[in-house]
Image: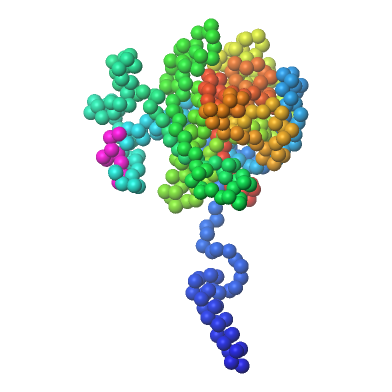
Amino acid sequence: MMNRWITTLLLGIGVAFFTGCGLNGGSGDLTGVQGRSPWFHPQPYGTVYIPTGSFHMGLSDQDIMSTITARQKQVTVQAFYMDDTEISNNEYRQFVYYVRDSIAAKTMGGEYLINEGEENERIDWRETNRIDYSDPDIADMLYDMFYQGNDRVIKTNLFDTRKLIFSWTWFDIQEAAKRKYLENPRPRNEFQIEEEIPVYPDTLAFVRDFTYSFNEPMAQAYFWHPAYDNYPVVGVSWKQANAFNAWRTAYLNSYYEGGGEPIVNPFRLPTEAEWEYAARGNRELSQYPWGGPYVRNSKGCFLANFKPLRGNYIEDGGLYPVKVLSYFPNDYGLYCMAGNVSEWTSSAYDESIYSTIDDLNPDFRYDAEDTDPDALKRKVIRGGSWKDIAFYIQVGSRSHEFQDTAKSYVGFRSVMTYMGRSNKDK
C-alpha cells in the first residue's frame, strides 16, 4: 500500500512538472511545439513560380555537333522561383552601388557607422543614402577610391572600379557531407569558404570578344548609360554572378529578419536541369521555349534575338542584346529563355554527364580553384545569345565558358528553391 502511494505521488509530481513547463497543459498528447505561426514561402519580387515536375532532359534535335549529349534522360526537379528576365544592367548596378557605398561608409566612419569601432559595428544605410559624391569635402575623404596618378586620364574624380570588391563567406556543404568526415568530424569553420570578388563588369568584353569588329561604342556606354538600364548585364563572370546572389540573399533576408520573419533559401544560379525545365515551359520535347520546331511565328516574324540567316543580325529585331522584356514569354512567364544572352548555370560542364547524374534534381558541381586546370573551370551556359545561330538557342543545346572569364554575350538570372511541396498547399 505504501509503495502504491509513493508511485502515485511521483506520477503526480511528474505531471505537475510538465504542466509547469507549459507543455500542452499536461494533456500528454504529442501535438508538437505550440505557438508557431503558419508560414508560406513569399514570392520574391520579379520572379515566377516554377512547379515541381519531371521532363525529358536533352536535345530534341539531331546531335549535329557530336557532343554525346543527345541521349535523353527523364528527371524530376523540385519547385523553385526564377527571375522572369535576365538580370538587367540597372539591377546589377544596385549591387555595384552597394559595394561602393559600403567602402565609402567604412572609409568615412562617424555618422555612417553604427557602434563604430565595436565588434557589432555596421553601416547605417539611412546615412549612406545621403552621400553626395560630388561634394569636394567627401571627395577628399574618399581620395583613395578614385583613379590616381597615370590612371587619372581625365581631370575629374572617377571611381577606380578595380577597388570595388565584395567579400562574403559561404559554407561548402558538399565537402562537409562527405562520408570520410562521419568518423573523423572536422570543426564547422573548416568548411567555410571566404571569397573576395571585384564586382564591376568587364565593359571591354565587347571589344575583346570580336577581332576585326567595331564594338567600341558598346564598350564605352553599355553598362553605365541609362539608355541600357533595362538591357541584360554582360561582362560578368560565373564568380561575379555567385557574388551577386550572395549579396541579394543577404539583402532580402536582412529585411525579413528586421521584421521578425523567418529567412528564406538563398538566391543562386540555376542548375542545368532547372534551367532547361523552366525554359521548356511545360512543353515536353519541344525544341524552343515557344514550342514547335520553327524560329518564326505564323506571320514570319522571328521569336528570339539570335543570328538568323547568314549574319543578318537585324532581321530578328535586335543587333546586340535587346531589352530583357523583349519578345513573348514562354508558358511559365519567362522572357528570353532563347537568345539575347546566354546564361550561366551552377553546373560544371562535362560532355557525357547525362549518363552519370541522378534523375532527382540532377546536378554536377565542381568549384574549381584558381590553380586547377582550365578543363575543370568549365561551367554550363544555356539559351544561346544574340551572336549565336539557331541551334544554340534550342532548349536542349549545351555550351560552356570558363568560370573566371566574362563575355559580351553571357549574362544570368537567379533562382530560389521553393520551401515546401507546392505553392498550392497554402
Report the colour scheme.
rainbow
At x 58%, y 74%, the residue is 27
On the image, the x and y values in percent for residue 239 come to 51, 30
Indicate whether residue 410 is drawn in magenta. no
At x 70%, y 31%, the residue is 353
* Residue furthest top in the image: 212
Evaluate whether residue 325 shows in this view: no
Residue range corresponding to the magenta coloring: 107-115
At x 47%, y 51%, the residue is 261
On the image, the x and y values in percent for residue 19 come to 52, 75
* Residue furthest bottom in the image: 1
On the image, the x and y values in percent for residue 390 come to 67, 18
At x 45%, y 30%, the residue is 197
Label count reads 0
Evaluate whether residue 224 shows in this view: yes
Which of the 4 image quarters holds residue 303?
top right
On the image, the x and y values in percent for residue 126 come to 33, 40
Q: Nearer the viewer, residue 75 or 358?
A: 358
Q: Is residue 210 above or below residue 89?
A: above
Q: Nearer the viewer, residue 155 or 176?
A: 176
